[in-house]
Image (cartoon, helix red, strand yellow):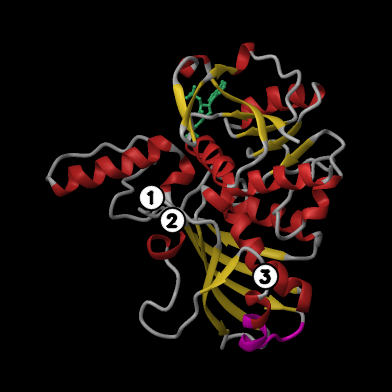
Amino acid sequence: KTYTVAVVGATGAVGETMLKVLAERQFPIGKLHVLASERSAGSKVDFGARQLVVEDLATFDPTGVDIALFSAGGSVSKEYAPKFAAAGAVVIDNSSTFRGDADVPLVVSEVNPEAAKNRPRGIIANPNCSTMQLMVALAPIHRAVGIERINIATYQSVSGTGAKAMAELGKQTADLLNFREIEPKVYPVQIAFNVIPHGGDFLDNGYTTEEWKLLTETRKILGDDNIQVNATVVRVPVFYGHSEAVHIETREKISVEKARELLAAQPGLVLVDERKAGGYPTPVTHASGNDPVFVGRLREDVSHPRGLDLWVVSDNIRKGAATNAVQLAELVIAEG
Ligand code: A2P
């Protein structure tokens, strides 16, 4: 059996990778529609060895689409995802629009796959990239001993902001090395050779929206509203791959040995945890271009009797967005 698939936002950083992952995993596609705005309609995108012509989302008729993968921003999802669902498609949406909706499951394929089956609106939400990798690492520990509190600082790459942000980092780096003036556009301050403690918009309580997503999405995915999450989101001059310094406090004490055992058995996770130079994952050496969530620097927290520290790295465009979306599509077709 094959399926009619639509990728909405096919010319974007995530959309392009969705096409790549669909081809790599040999998703059973009968017909594939690649959609974007009027601006890029008529241009071509790669799908495996083939090239496909981009169609204009605004004039596209979704009748007959079985599965639609959306990554064209929140306003596009808000308007078009319900239309595709009404036409009979299962929509897998990468925006934050529906993540908080009680009638929309929020699913990490290796963590809560069963939740994808219950989708009254015909929409499944793909979590935020930072939450995604955190859940793959923490779900096995939460199931075993319960997590009371998560304290996390992220080191997020610029690809999460989009193609323009990647261009800005490249250009600023080249300009500064050549003693030229720079003018920040995408980010409020210089990103090259700098770090910026700001992701999304500021909330009244002082947190940013990207920090708040780590709280609300973690609770929904793990199905536990008692988990406390304190996040600081930081943008760093890295192209692909988010890193996270994670400190957890568990209900029951867990040893490093036990945590290692649990993490080694977790699908989608690779432990890189040797206590020596280079014996840990980084975006460049491990994550970039790959699917797994990499975990290292495991240690018992000397400052807390039930504390554990981990370092979690993954490619935000692959597992953090495109790969998980395709895995959710695989779950849907496995239902038969
Ligand atoms: P387009 O290339 O036509 O602008 P990124 O996050 O990397 O900037 O990518 C955003 C994606 O969402 C692109 O594929 C972009 O298409 C698409 N997109 C943005 N706005 C719209 C819209 N109004 N209708 C359809 N697609 C859109």
Identify the residue shown where x is 68% and y is 78%: 262
The quadrant of the picture occupied by the N terminus is top right
- SS under mark 3: loop
Vertical arrangement, residue 204 with respect to residue 4, above or below = below
Q: Amino acid at mark 1?
A: Phe
Residue 208 appears in the picture as rendered? no
Q: Which mark is residue 288?
A: 2
Residue extent of the magenta highlight: 252-260
Residue 154 on the magenta span: no
The answer to which of 180 and 110 lies nearer the viewer is 110
Residue 173 position, x and y percent, is: 24, 47
Q: Quickly name the residue at label 3.
A: 266
Residue 166 position, x and y percent, is: 37, 42
Q: Amino acid at mark 3?
A: Gln
Q: Amino acid at mark 2?
A: Ser
User: Crowding at label 3, few (<14), some or many (≥20) Cα neighbours within 10 Å?
Assistant: some
- In the image, is 83 to the left or to the right of 214? right
Q: Earlier in the sequence, mark 1 or mark 3?
A: 1
Q: Which mark is residue 239?
A: 1
The quadrant of the picture occupied by the C terminus is top right
Identify the residue shown where x is 53% and y is 30%: 10
Examine the image and state in which quarter residue 275 appears.
Answer: bottom left
Vertical arrangement, residue 24 with respect to residue 247, above or below = above
- In the image, is 232 to the left or to the right of 250? left
Callout 2–callout 1 Cβ contact below 8 Å? yes
